[in-house]
Amino acid sequence: METGKGTVKAVALIVGDNNVKGSIHFLHQSNGTTHVSGRITGLSPGLHGFHIHALGDTTNGCNSTGPHFNPLNKHHGAPADHHRHAGDLGNILAGPDGVAEISITDSQIPLSGVHSILGRAVVVHADPDDLGRGGHELSKTTGNAGARVGCGIIGLQSSV
């Protein structure tokens, strides 16, 4: 892990339905990418859509976090796709114990600048994200990932 002056770190505490909880850490790296790591418990086993949503508003639970973060107005896609929402981080996998260990590096979710994700929300969905390829009417907007089962607001983290 990178430490020192100028390093930007953030954290989101995940809270949700049916005892879904966890923490997600964001570390802006010197090469311009952001590393996302963390652990979420209380999930059903299998794949779950994992996205950055536009709003850091949880006044109505995860439903008030708005759509996927999409500053360039693109269609939904997979993390490696050129044309995708900035907030499209694909899927996380919960094991038989309902625990998902997360380690993702992405170039479209900076912690500073005009497209910063600070103050936005990270959301875990009930179902797998079809990565825009499912043919469902929601594939190109949400990946047809289903209900929002957990979320947290992304905030600056102390360097100490």
Image: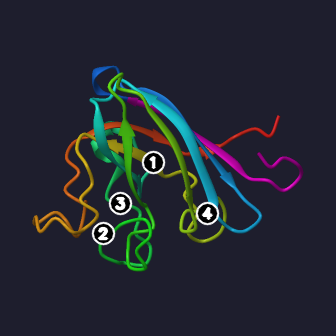
**Residue holding disc 4:** 110
Residues at marks 2 and 1, CA–CA distance in whole angstroms: 17 Å
Mark 2 vs mark 1, foreground winner is: 2
Q: Which residue: 30% across, 43% down?
A: 47
Secondary structure, mark 2, is loop
Secondary structure found at label 3: loop
What is the x, y in percent for residue 33?
64, 64
Q: Could you classify mark 4 by the number of other residues whose Cα lies within 10 Å: few (under 14), some (14-19), or many (20 or more)?
A: many
Residue 140 figure quarter = bottom left
Answer with left or right where residue 117 lies relative to residue 1.
left
Which residue is the site of mark 3? Answer: 68
Q: Indicate the quadrant where residue 73 lies.
A: bottom left
The mark nearer the N terminus, 2 or 3, is 3
Disc number placed over residue 121 in the picture, else none: 1
Q: Decide: marks 2, 3 in contact (CB < 8 A)?
A: yes
Marker disc for residue 18: none
Give the residue type at disc 2: His
Residue at 43% x, 65% y is 79
User: Start and end of the magenta stretch?
Assistant: 1-15
- Badge 2 is on which residue? 76
4 or 1: mark nearer the eye: 4
Q: Quadrant of the C terminus?
A: top right
Q: Residue furthest front?
A: 96
